[in-house]
Amino acid sequence: MAVAAALLAGLFAYVYLGGLARRAPVVVASRDFPAYSTLSGDLLKTVMLPVCAIHPAAIRNPADVQGQVSLVPRAAGEQVLAPSLAGGQNPGDYRAVLGPEERALFMPAASVLGGWVGTTRGDYVDLTAVLEGQALTVAQGLEILEIVFESPTSPIGGGRSETPGGVFLRVTPGMAERIALAAEYGEVYCSVFGYSGVPVSTEGAWLNQLYQGGDQSGEAIWP
């Protein structure tokens, strides 16, 4: 039995030392940084550690987490773990991509004519308000950070259909004020950007312009 115990101890030692000998790359913090820091090249580095010392959720490639936010503080040399990161890809992650002076404004579907049907997360939109015979662009290039769906029971076949109940838009507090005022006292329309769309200066439109007619050829967009 003594010989068997010695052999078993030797086997364990061999496996342990073998694990120490085998190393693999892992991403660690290059220096201390606080929670909610945006990960960039100067905060991360790749080191070689024994395979047995690498956490199963550790990040192996720094390119996979560039631009994501660490939800916890890190100490220099600490492994970066996937569950502690947020990058905007999952529901609720929009908080991670907001700048210090940005906010996520929730606009229910009822506040925009036509609701948010046809839009998707990542779209950019303009909001145009019509109030007392005047139409004005309230804000341009607002990013849809997240869509909140409601799932009412479908009257046909007893199934369920997802309908946008509202969206979260990336705004500044000043934008939020103008949008809220427009939704409260006017009618708000949504225009979706194309893939190559950019903000465009506008002058607004008045009801008397429609009555007067006139040459609008400068606004034509057809070939």
Image: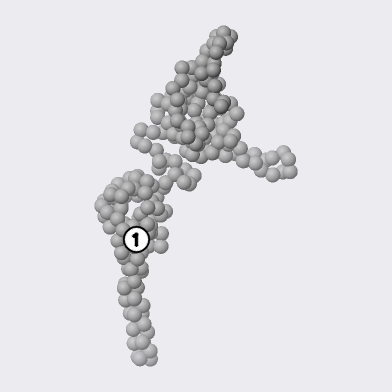
**Mark 1 surroundings within 10 Å by alpha-carbon count, few (fewer than 14), some (14 through 19), many (20 or more):** many
The residue positioned 46% from the left and 46% from the top of the image is 89
Amino acid at circle 1? Val
The residue positioned 47% from the left and 23% from the top of the image is 138
The residue positioned 52% from the left and 20% from the top of the image is 219
When the figure is inspected, residue 39 is found, relative to residue 109, above or below; the finding is below
* Residue 57, picture quadrant: bottom left
Residue 41 picture location, percent across and down:
31, 50
The residue positioned 51% from the left and 23% from the top of the image is 128
Residue 187 picture location, percent across and down:
55, 21
When the figure is inspected, residue 111 is found, relative to residue 132, above or below; the finding is below
Disc 1: which residue: 26
The answer to whether one can see residue 27 in this image is yes
In-image side of 69 versus 209 (left or right): left
Quadrant containing the C terminus is top right
The answer to whether one can see residue 207 in this image is no
Residue 171 picture location, percent across and down:
42, 31
